[in-house]
Image (tube, grey):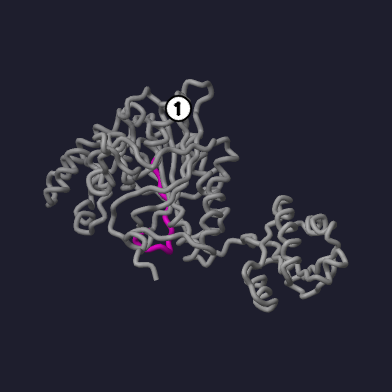
Amino acid sequence: MSTFTAPKGTYDLLPPSSATFLAIRERIAAPARRAGYGYIETPVFEDVKLFSRGVGESTDIVTKEMYNLTTKGGDELALRPEGTASVLRAALQANLHKQGNLPVKLWYSGSYYRYERAQKGRYRQFSQVGAEAIGAEDPALDAELIILADDAFRSLGLSDYSLLLNSLGDKQCRPVYRAALIEFLTGLDLDEETRRRAEINPLRVLDDKRKDVQDQLVGAPMLRDFLCEDCKAYDEKVRELLTANGVAFVDDPKLVRGLDYYTRTTFEFVHNGLGAQSAIGGGGRYDGLSEMIGGPALPSVGWALGVDRTFLALEAEGVALDLPAATAVYAVALGEEAKNTLFAKVVELRRAGVATDLAFGVKSIKNAMKSADRSGARFALIAGDRDLAEGVVQLKDMNTGEQTPVALDALVTTLKEKQL
């Protein structure tokens, strides 16, 4: 037994469950790809200031959870705790916003890192699929992204989840609300750390999950009551488009999420079967983030959906994805000469697009057929010296047990005709 184990807060993805993770990533990304979002991949580490400026100095992500490192050359870097800041940085660096059509539509998939208290559903390395629309201010774009996320969850067979929706206002109306909230918070019995956080960004206190804090927030001013006319109209249009396209939502006036860059539309998908770690994805509009990290004004909106949490949500609902078997054909050779011939056929079938495996290192036909059965293959190819002398192999249907000879030179065509 190995003396090494996976680091705390991480886990290994292993077959067969790893096939479900791959399918989740594919199905989450599929609606975005159909909507014109192109794939982007960024480094797993960035300049630490990218996140402290963009995500926010007052957030737990920056103050407590980032994995910081100093290179031998003295550069201060951080493992990426989220995807949006990196994607926007890459788009700005490549001048994608200057190449014509706006918004720039991008989707991505990868691992992210936060030093959190490890528990089920909260990992120190976690997987997300995200989508960002950069460079356009349009409520239809906000609605599009929310609908794409909802379509992704529906395509996986999930149903026991809710969409929480709020508006955080903009640079016109949010300062007025901020002043009112600070005044309210001043009268509360808060610890010193929470007071410091409130001084930097008082909205962060609304996101505090501690019961003693939440109890004191009863009666706190709500941002919705301070929205300017433009923000109200924008929010109403987003809601109108969601309703018209069959996406239900729940108003959550305290929803601010864990990042400082959000403006106007903010949303979160929560699953009813996951307990405390109920969020399976979320996002919102971040119209000022580009300027925060040194770029031009580029109003944008996006989301990230959690692959790990979605996997747990599928388990909670008892949903098993219908996945194709990893192997469609399993070859069993009786003797060394037969193995050489079948090996060549296995290579030929794979090159023809048929998922094929071969019994390696087995000592008996009985063990080989057990391996064929465990592989999940629909057909087994069996050949010995007598079969080869006749120019055939035996094709066994693993579902019915029926076995028929097939000419070697017609094997690939025969199996392709069976739609493997």
Q: Is residue 140 magenta?
A: no
**Residue 92: quarter of image:** top left
* Residue extending farthest front: 336
| Residue 403 drawn at (x, y percent) | 81, 72
| Residue 209 in the image: above or below residue 291 | below
Query: Going 40% across and 62% down the picture, which residue do you hit?
Result: 274
Query: Going 66% across and 67% down the picture, which residue do you hit?
Result: 359
The residue pinned by badge 1 equals 135
| Residue 7 in the image: above or below residue 234 | below
Query: Going 25% across and 47% down the picture, which residue do you hit?
Result: 60
**Residue 387: quarter of image:** bottom right
Local secondary structure at mark 1: loop
| Residue 177 drawn at (x, y percent) | 25, 36
Stretch of the chain drawn in magenta: 266-277
Q: Is residue 70 left or right of residue 323?
A: left
Q: Residues within 10 Å of mark 1 (few under 14, many from 20)?
A: many
Mark 1 is on which residue type?
Gly
Which sits in the foreground, 77 or 134? 77
Which sits in the foreground, 253 or 370? 370
| Residue 232 in the image: above or below residue 17 | above
